[in-house]
Image (spheres, helix red, strand yellow):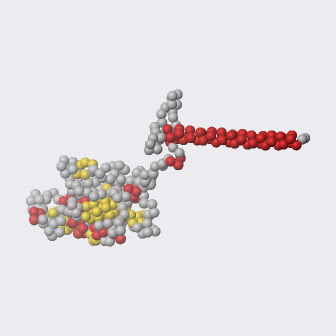
């Protein structure tokens, strides 16, 4: 091969290599352009499905009546918002099929019911029978004088005991008197059934005297005074009583309570009780408030947190006007259901009433 032919061959090889490189570069540019177009087209298409606030528009039907993808399908997983579930109560807090305080209401999580003595007032209240779950408490309507459903009252647990009558007698104080006296009579402790009435001076009305034939002499009630009358006369002319029944019977006991409730209020109720510290709260204690028409709620169950020592308790009572005795809901913490807890200062709020640390009392 001549020198000229060798030079020509080298030049041809260089041109061939240059052409190949140009072809490769061109192919790369074409591929890059296609990728760019695809990405741009997808972004543009996605943008068309959103409004200015970046909110997915309502999907529409296509020309072939095929449903468009749902909004959930169009939202990237990272943009989906999971709603926060509302707090729920433990399903075992209210066992609606059970009909006593202790079996219908389980202790709050982390709490254990306190032990009580067999036959005690504490056991009596904790195991008090309840009407069917959902029964609404009845109250005396002061305008129509009829019994109506108490508006806003809890249906969690109505005590299975009727009002003393259909009148406006068994109010807030009367409900506490009823529970205490029914327990004492049931265990045969007649001598302990005695209540001070709101007279001047306070008049002690003992059931034992009533059993023996004593009745209230109301001749001086206009002066806010009461006394016992035992000489009833043939027609009851001496103090307004006749056909007096001696001894203990359901009817006589009921009549006694009606007389007691007629002349009782929260202030007189406190006279037969002593003030106790909320730190020593027990079943059978009573929160009393003389504000307004007065309020009295009895502690019918107690549970304690063994780790912290904190107490939770259930209260029950009637109301003014006369209302069926019923368990009250916790109106400040729904998650506690019917269980109440004290604030740091020893107070607690129940409905529209605030009971302070110095409002807790216990029967003497």
**26 or 162, which is in the foreground?**
26
* Residue situated furthest top in the rendering: 64
For the question of whether residue 256 can be seen, the reply is no
Task: Determine the residue positioned at 17% across, 68% down.
Answer: 203
Q: Position of residue 182 (x, y in %)?
A: 29, 61
> Can you say whether 279 is above or below 55 in the image?
below
Quadrant the N terminus occupies: top right
Task: Determine the residue positioned at 21% across, 48% down.
Answer: 146
**125 or 243, which is in the foreground?**
125
User: In the shown orientation, is residue 280 left or right of residue 1?
Assistant: left
User: In the shown orientation, is residue 174 left or right of residue 92?
Assistant: left
User: In the shown orientation, is residue 16 left or right of residue 115?
Assistant: right
Task: Determine the residue positioned at 37% across, 50% down.
Answer: 133
Quadrant the C terminus occupies: bottom left
* Residue situated furthest front in the rendering: 4
> Residue 23 is drawn in which quadrant?
top right
Task: Determine the residue positioned at 45% across, 60% down.
Answer: 109
For the question of whether residue 274 can be seen, the reply is yes
> Can you say whether 70 is above or below 265 in the image?
above
**3 or 352, which is in the foreground?**
3
> Can you say whether 16 is above or below 282 in the image?
above
User: In the shown orientation, is residue 98 left or right of residue 261?
Assistant: right
> Can you say whether 216 is above or below 135 in the image?
below
Q: Position of residue 330 (x, y in %)?
A: 35, 58
């Amino acid at each position: 091969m001549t020198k000229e032919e060798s030079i020509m061959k080298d030049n041809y090889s260089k041109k061939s290599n240059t052409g190949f490189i140009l072809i490769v570069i061109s192919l790369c540019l074409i591929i890059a352009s296609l990728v760019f177009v695809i990405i741009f087209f997808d972004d543009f298409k996605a943008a068309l499905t959103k409004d200015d606030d970046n909110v997915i528009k309502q999907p529409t039907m296509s020309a072939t009546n095929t449903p468009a993808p749902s909004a959930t399908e169009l939202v990237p997983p990272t943009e989906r918002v999971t709603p926060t579930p509302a707090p729920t109560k433990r399903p075992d807090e209210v066992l609606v099929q059970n009909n006593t305080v202790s079996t219908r209401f389980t202790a709050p999580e982390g709490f254990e019911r306190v032990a009580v003595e067999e036959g005690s007032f504490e056991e009596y209240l904790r195991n008090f029978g309840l009407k069917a779950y959902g029964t609404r408490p009845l109250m005396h309507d002061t305008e129509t004088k009829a019994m109506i459903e108490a508006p806003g009252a809890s249906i969690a647990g109505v005590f299975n005991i009727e009002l003393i009558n259909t009148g406006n007698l068994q109010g807030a104080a009367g409900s506490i008197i009823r529970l205490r006296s029914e327990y004492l009579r049931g265990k045969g402790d007649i001598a302990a059934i005695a209540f001070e009435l709101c007279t001047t001076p306070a008049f002690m009305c003992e059931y034992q005297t009533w059993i023996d034939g004593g009745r209230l002499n109301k001749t001086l009630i206009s002066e806010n005074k009461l006394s016992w009358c035992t000489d009833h006369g043939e027609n009851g002319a001496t103090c307004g009583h006749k056909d007096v029944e001696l001894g203990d019977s359901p009817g006589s006991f009921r009549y006694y309570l009606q007389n007691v409730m007629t002349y009782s209020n929260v202030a007189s109720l406190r006279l037969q009780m002593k003030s106790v510290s909320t730190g020593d709260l027990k079943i059978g204690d009573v929160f009393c408030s003389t504000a307004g028409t007065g309020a009295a709620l009895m502690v019918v169950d107690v549970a304690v947190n063994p780790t912290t020592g904190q107490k939770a308790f259930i209260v029950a009572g009637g109301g003014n006007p006369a209302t069926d005795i019923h368990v009250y809901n916790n109106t400040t913490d729904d998650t506690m259901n019917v269980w109440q807890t004290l604030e740091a200062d020893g107070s607690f709020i129940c409905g529209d009433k605030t009971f302070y640390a110095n409002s807790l009392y216990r029967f003497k």
